[in-house]
Amino acid sequence: MGYNTYIQLIQNLVRKKTEIISGTMGKEVERAQIAVNKAKEGKKVVMVSSGDPGVYGMAGIVLEVAAKDQNPIQVNIIPGVTAATAVSAILGAPLVSDFSVISLSDLLTPWEKIERRLEMAAQADVSIVLYNPRSQGRIEPLAKAYEIMTKHIKPDTPVGIVRQAGREGENYIITTLKNMLNEKIDMVTTIIVGNSATKVVSGKMVTARGYDLNR
Ligand SMILES: C[S@@+](CC[C@H](N)C(=O)[O-])C[C@H]1O[C@@H](n2cnc3c(N)ncnc32)[C@H](O)[C@@H]1O
């Protein structure tokens, strides 16, 4: 079971007789309920997320729906490589020090809360990973996030923008906070904004951890 795009991505791994139930975005609770019902019928059910199912994925809702039952089914969560670390590896090593992860989607989280988190992360001088930065219908949040970050973070701070990490069409660019909005950014993009110790070395984005290289 899973969101259409993810099911398509694993087509070649699915055995011929496997029953496939794919769905659209916004039907997560229904999908989790069907998965739990199928498991209760005795079927082995796999709920497919992208990256790590516990990072803005289906793990939470499946556990919540399963827990409503008097005799809860067993749920095993298999960890994956989340976009933050997949993207970090493409860019270099921007996350070797403390960092924060913030989704700009206000579908399930009130925007005021997202703004507050952004403000605090920007003030705390931690690298910031932005998930769900922009979709066709959601352009405003990234512009607002940019305004908040530029209040506290220097304009020449390195920013890495990666699209389609690990998938066909993967591409990335390392730019600066000042120029980040000039780049193509969509729903298959993850952005990493460095902290005050982040620099670009031989074309790679690296956050210095504090080691003395001259010893
Ligand atoms: C609903 S979240 C799912 C995150 C996923 N569970 C994970 O652990 O990576 C969707 C967001 O994750 C990021 N993302 C997921 N896959 C990506 C990829 N292949 N390349 C770049 N960003 C990706 C994008 O920011 C996208 O808007």
Image (cartoon, rainbow, N blue to C red):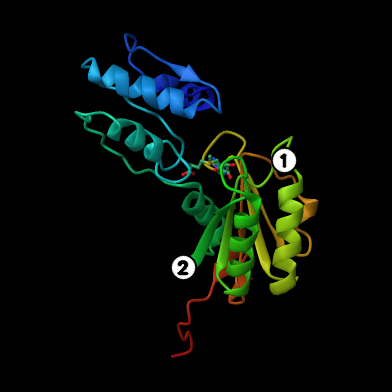
Q: Is mark 1 within 8 Å of ligand 1?
A: no
Residue highlighted by disc 1: 138
Residue 170 on image: x %, y % = 60, 40
Tell me if mark 1 has few (under 14), some (14-19) or many (20+) residues whose alpha carbon lies within 10 angstroms of its own: some
Task: Kindly state the secondary structure of the residue where label 2 is placed.
Answer: loop
Q: CA distance from mark 1 to mark 2?
A: 31 Å
Q: Counting residues from the N terminus, which is met first, the one under dot 1 or under dot 2?
A: 2
Q: Which residue is mark 2?
A: 96
Query: How many residues crowd around disc 2 within 10 Å: few (fewer than 14), some, or many (20 or more)?
Result: some
Give coordinates of residue 123: x percent, y percent. Answer: 62, 74
**Label 1 secondary element:** loop
Residue at the image point whose x is 48% and y is 82% from the top? 210
Mark identifier at residue 104: none
The N terminus - image quarter: top left
Q: Is residue 203 visible?
A: no
User: Which quadrant would residue 34 be assigned to in this image?
Assistant: top left
